[in-house]
């Protein structure tokens, strides 16, 4: 199975054989989980969400500063 992460700054595919959390998939794609929000069909997904099938997920970079 695979997860395709797409966004302005991202285009990465992660292959996996069993269920995987969004956080684990982001890390496997070399995307720092603390710097992004992930959504599917306009719904924000917690990084603890478990993925069990092929998906394309939107990745939005979060920036902060002071």
Image: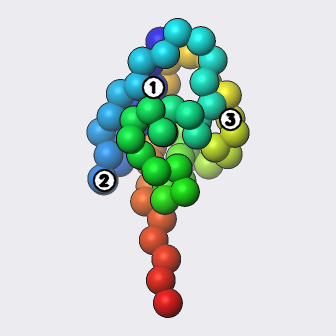
On the question of residue 63 being in view, the answer is yes
Report the disc number at residue 8. 2
State the image coordinates of residue 31 (x, y, percent, origin top left): 41, 46
Residue at image mark 1? 3
**Residue 50: image location, x then y, percent:** 67, 28
Q: Position of residue 30 (x, y in %)?
A: 38, 41
| Other-residue count near label 2 (Cα within 10 Å), few / some / many at <14 / 14–19 / ≥20 | few
Q: Estimate the spatial distance between the alpha carbons at disc 2 and disc 1, rounded to whole Å.
A: 17 Å
Apparent side of residue 10 relative to residue 46 in the rendered image (left or right): left
Contact flag, marks 2 and 3 (Cβ < 8 Å): no
Extreme-bottom residue of the structure: 66
Residue of label 3: 49
Q: Residue at 69% of width from left, 39% of height from top? A: 48
Residue 41 appears in the picture as rendered:
no
Q: How many marks?
A: 3
Q: Classify residue 34 by image quadrant.
A: bottom right
Q: Residue at x 60, y 24 (%)?
A: 20
Of the image marks 2 and 1, the number of the one nearer the N terminus: 1
Q: CA distance from mark 3 to mark 1?
A: 13 Å
Is the residue marked by circle 3 packed among few (<14), some (14-19), or many (20+) residues within 10 Å? Answer: few
User: Disc 3, disc 1: CB below 8 Å?
Assistant: no
- Mark before the other along the chain sequence, 2 or 3: 2
């Amino acid at each position: 199975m695979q997860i395709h992460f797409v966004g302005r700054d991202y285009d990465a595919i992660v292959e996996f054989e069993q269920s995987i959390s969004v956080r684990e998939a982001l890390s496997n794609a070399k995307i720092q989980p603390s710097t992004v929000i992930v959504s599917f069909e306009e719904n924000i997904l917690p990084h603890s969400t478990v993925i069990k099938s092929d998906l394309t997920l939107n990745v939005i970079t979060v920036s902060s500063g002071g």
